[in-house]
Amino acid sequence: MTKEQSLVWASAHFLSTPFPADIFEYGDEDDILEHIKDHPWEVFEDHPALNVWSYIEALADDVRRLNPDQTKPNQTNNKPMKRKLNLLLVIPSLDTPAIAVLADIDMTDLPKLKSLLTEALMDEHCVNQVTCDDIPEWVSSQSFPQFTIKYVVHDEGDNYTHAVDISPIAIYE
């Protein structure tokens, strides 16, 4: 997968209308940022276009790194396909949300998923305790579940309620 192909693919995770396939041939950074401003996914409507562009680039880089031999996002070179899900987490913060990836997740083991999510949130918030809502059962029956989980950060006697947006990233090997 080329860098441009991965950017177009990744843009679909952050924008209501992904980048056109030829945007990198005819457009410059201003055209890219304008497209982001015009087509944000609802969760990212209040994010500056430059931040969303950095999220897209980070996801595209991770996908290319995780799938170096892949020629298309859903195809590998003559290897048997086994679907695994990596999960992209958009974690709120005071200024710019953090992005984290949970790799190779078994979506049928919801207690383990909740535990991994809790650990990632504790790491991101630099605290020793986070309480997450249970992950809905329907998540395990969906091919590519996109969902939000509410959680509470427990920090030195104070409790802060947040929500983390979770989007799947399919990995084929």
Image (spheres, rainbow, N blue to C red):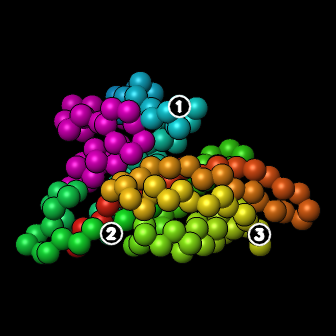
Instruction: Measure the C-alpha gap from mark 2 to mark 1.
Output: 29 Å
Q: Which residue is mark 2?
A: 84
Whether label 2 touches label 1, CB < 8 Å: no
Residue 106 on image: x %, y %: 41, 72
Q: Which residue is mark 3?
A: 129
Residue at horizontal 62%, vertical 61%? 134
Residue 52 on image: x %, y %: 48, 41
Residue 20 position by quadrant: top left
Q: Do we see residue 143 in this rendering?
A: yes
Whether label 2 touches label 3, CB < 8 Å: no
Q: Which residue is more in the foreground, 51 or 116?
A: 116
Residue 86 on image: x %, y %: 40, 65
User: Is residue 155 covered in magenta?
Assistant: no
Q: In the current view of this chain or complex, which residue is farthest to the right?
A: 157
- Residue range in magenta is 1-29
Kindly identify which numbered label has been placed on residue 45.
1
Mark 2 nearby-residue class (10 Å; few <14, some 14–19, many ≥20) = some
Q: Secondary structure at mark 1?
A: loop
Residue at horizontal 66%, vertical 52%? 150
**Tag 1: amino acid:** Glu
For marks 3 and 1, the one nearer the N-term is: 1
Instruction: Measure the C-alpha gap from mark 2 to mark 3.
Output: 29 Å
Residue at horizontal 58%, vertical 32%? 46
